[in-house]
Amino acid sequence: MEITQSLLHELFDYIDGNLIWKVAKSRQVKVGDIAGHLDTFGYICVGIDNKLYKAHRLIYLYHNGYLPPCLDHIDGNKSNNKIDNLRSASTSQNQMNIRLSTKNTSGTKGVTWNKKSKKWLVRVRAESKEHCFGYFDDKELAKSVAIDATNKIHKEFSSYKGVLNGTA
């Protein structure tokens, strides 16, 4: 069975970022229950006819009638499925808005320590291209350069939206 906007409207109501069951599809589901469970990656998944779907994709389809190849959570929170937090994006744009990696040692996306030069290196990636902005002795200057560069290159998909020159 293909998931369509009309099927979603038959099965669910949408309230504040949640799909609410209108139909008891199994013994575990009651009318009025919030649909879905949190998966190991932080996404809410919903089972329909023995198939799992990511709730944010269902919610986008529920409201817009189509599914783009990729969706972006604007605030970076994978479980915030409010419709105004979801937008169509390319895979590259979605990656631009990704959160800081736990492996990052500088505390800033795009800033890494270069052992050979013993300086902070600023690099920003977009559309499969890496842009290098130089080496810096001062970590705070590197951070400021990285934030400005990220905002210019990633535009509305920048994870530093609203942050200018390293300040909030």
Image (cartoon, rainbow, N blue to C red):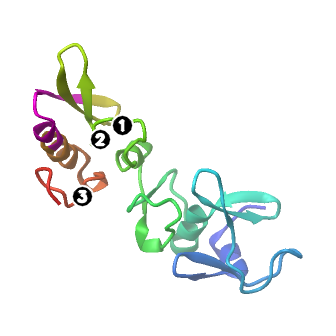
Foreground mark, 1 or 3, reads 1
Q: Nearer the viewer, residue 133 or 114?
A: 114
Residue type at tag 1:
Asn
Q: CA distance from mark 1 to mark 3?
A: 19 Å
- Quarter of the image that includes the N terminus: bottom right
Tell me the residue at 35%/31% (across/down).
128
Q: Is residue 153 above or below residue 62?
A: above
Residue 158 x %, y %: 28, 51
Q: Upstream in the sequence, badge 3 or badge 2?
A: 2
Q: Is 157 situated left or right of 133 in this image?
A: right
Q: CA distance from mark 3 to mark 2?
A: 13 Å
Magenta residues span 131-143
Q: Upstream in the sequence, badge 1 or badge 3?
A: 1
Quadrant in which residue 62 is drawn? bottom right
Residue 138 shown in magenta: yes
Q: Which residue is mark 1?
A: 104
Secondary-structure class at tag 3 = loop
Q: Which residue is mark 3?
A: 161
Point out which mark residue 109 bears.
Answer: 2
The local crowd at label 3, few if under 14, some if 14 to 19, many if 20 or more residues have their Cα within 10 Å, is some
The local crowd at label 1, few if under 14, some if 14 to 19, many if 20 or more residues have their Cα within 10 Å, is few
Foreground mark, 2 or 1, reads 1
Q: Nearer the viewer, residue 28 or 59?
A: 28
Quadrant in which residue 6 is drawn? bottom right
Tally of numbered tags: 3
Secondary-structure class at tag 1 = loop
Q: Is residue 7 above or below residue 147?
A: below
Residue 72 x %, y %: 44, 56
